[in-house]
Image (tube, rainbow, N blue to C red):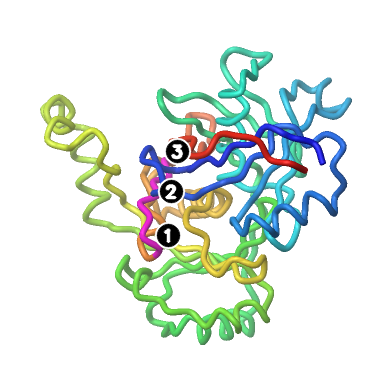
Amino acid sequence: MTPRRFKQVDVFSATPYRGNPLAVVLDGTGLSDEEMQQFAHWTKLSETTFLLPPSGPGAAAGADYRVRIFTPASELPFAGHPTLGSCHAWLQAGGAPKAPAEIVQECGVGLIRIRRDGERLAFAAPPLKRSTPEPALLEKVMVALGLHPSQIIATQLLDNGPVWLGLLLDNAQTVLELAPNHLTLKALGYLVGVAAVDAPRFTATLIARSNREARAFGPRSTPPDAPAAAAVEVRAFTAPVGILEDPVTGSLNASLAQWLIADGHAPSSYVASQGRCLGRAGRVHIEQDAHGQVWVGGNCVTCIDGVVKL
């Protein structure tokens, strides 16, 4: 067994132990698929990543490093909180990006651009494929979640690497009160993401942004370590990959943002809250730039720094 540098990073939170933890093995060279999967199963975190040098084609295309992402049950082609957490760990360990403006990560879906936004990192959401879910599937998921049709505003199948069944619900309280039948969801084999847009808070946010006095004096009334106010509430049910509910989910928030913004359900810039039902205070910062690219950002903080034998 080889000693390898290891970090456990909390993602989508500036406060340790309030976001979504990620295990990062900083050098996965020489490990087999089975060894990576076994370690990810042992950590019991929603994801564990292994950093590697970029492939030949990846390096030629500008990749700074390559990452492999594992849940306790399987490998993922892409995931959001492992992207930010792995980048944070790579930079903290001395990684130097080829381009000063952004970091380029290679993973199963290809190259992912990551930019530094003050204290936060933000990744460019990968291309999204979406479609209308089959009525039979939607009916089974509604029953498993205990939802009435009147509580659902819109639905989509969302594919940006992982495939999510996305449901837009009537309000944040409906999202927070869900008590799913996880065994049923696991049997269905679908990751399920639910969200609700807080219209009054969204309106208040727009007013604050357009008001110079609010910009000048508003932040001073908020403690510097307080989580940002959120206009969207999100939960992610992930029983098929071995975790019943994911605390804070970058890939889901990316695909939700691309869908909700495109269809006029959400503004082009907002903050999403996730993890409240698990005692977390995750904050996901969404921004669509002038070119239509959606960026998904969040804070990262290292909680454990050491060595693992693999």
Which residue is depicted at the point 56% across and 37% down? 84
Q: Are marks 3 and 2 in contact (CB under 8 Å)?
A: yes
The residue sitting at 85% across, 29% down in the picture is: 55
Quadrant of the snapshot with the C terminus: top right
Residues under labels 3 and 1: Cα distance? 15 Å
Amino acid type for the residue under numbered disc 2: Gly
State which quarter of the image contains the N terminus.
Answer: top right
Left or right: 288 as drawn, with respect to 6:
left
Question: Based on the displayed image, in which of its 4 quarters is residue 31 positioned?
Answer: top right
Q: Mark 1: which secondary structure?
A: strand
- Tell me: 289 left or right of 157: left
Q: Earlier in the sequence, mark 3 or mark 1?
A: 1
Which residue is disc 1 drawn over?
A: 234
Give the number of callouts.
Answer: 3
Secondary structure, mark 2, is: loop
The amino acid type, in three-letter code, at marker 3 is: Gly
User: Which is more N-terminal, label 2 or label 1?
Assistant: 2
Image depth: mark 3 or mark 2 in front: 2
- Say which amino acid is labelled 1: Val
The 10 Å Cα crowd at callout 1, few under 14, some 14 to 19, many 20 or more, is: many
Task: Give the residue at x 67% y 79%.
Answer: 188
Measure the alpha-carbon separation of dots 3 and 2.
Answer: 10 Å
Q: Which residues are magenta?
A: 278-285
Front residue of 17 and 293: 17
Please provide percent x and percent y for residue 275.
41, 58
Q: Nearer the viewer, mark 1 or mark 2?
A: 2
- Seen at 76% across and 38% down, the residue is 110
Q: Does residue 106 appear to the left or right of 120 in the view shown?
A: right
**Depth check, front residue: 156 or 281:** 281
Q: Which residue is mark 2?
A: 19
| Picture quadrant where residue 166 is located | bottom right
